[in-house]
Image (spheres, helix red, strand yellow):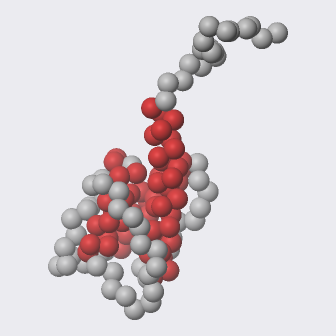
Amino acid sequence: MSWQTPRTDWTNGENFTAAEMNRIAGNINYLNPKAGLKEDYTEDDILTQNQWDTMQEALRVLLTICGISAEIPGDVINSATINAVEQLTAALKIRVDSIRAQAMANIYAGDLYPGENYVRGV
């Protein structure tokens, strides 16, 4: 799944739909394909605590990989928790994109390639 812009304006009383959970799970899978979260929730599905816990664990792994110190949103699924998850995935995307860009750059450790005007440092 491709990245979808997180929604961070949840308010109390709004329904959390299968499409919303698919977006969150898809974004986490985009950031870490090894997370393997379910992305095909339907309106007939009921989000279980085990599925929510798996999503939290995937966020924990991403935070560790990215070196970000942040709290994992709580166990209660409400508007505040969903907003926190969406904000966290947005912050993680910035870090993951940076890491991916660095990995693609050509880095010559210990060597300098300035062109023909190279002057050895003292």
45 relative to 5, above or below: below
Specify whether 34 is left or right of 120: left
Residue situated furthest front in the rendering = 117
> Can residue 75 be spotted in the picture?
no
- In this view, the residue farthest toward the right is 122
Which one is nearer the viewer's eye here, 39 or 60?
A: 39
Above or below residue 38? Residue 106 is above
Task: Give the farthest residue toward the bottom.
Answer: 13
Asked whether 90 or 118 is in front, the reply is 118
- Residue 58: name its quadrant: bottom left
Q: Is residue 96 left or right of residue 39?
A: right
Q: Position of residue 68 (x, y in %)?
A: 59, 53
Give percent across and percent down for residue 116.
62, 7
The residue at the point 34 percent across, 47 percent down is: 34
At a point 73% along the width and 8% down the height, the residue shown is 119
Q: Residue at x 35, y 57 (%)?
A: 3
Residue at 39% x, 49% y: name it: 32
Quarter of the image that includes the N terminus? bottom left
Image quadrant assignment for residue 18: bottom left
Can you say which quadrant of the picture contains the C terminus? top right
Q: x and y percent of residue 15 in the render? A: 33, 86
Q: Position of residue 60 (x, y in %)?
A: 49, 57
Is 26 above or below relative to 46?
above
Q: Is residue 109 visible?
A: yes
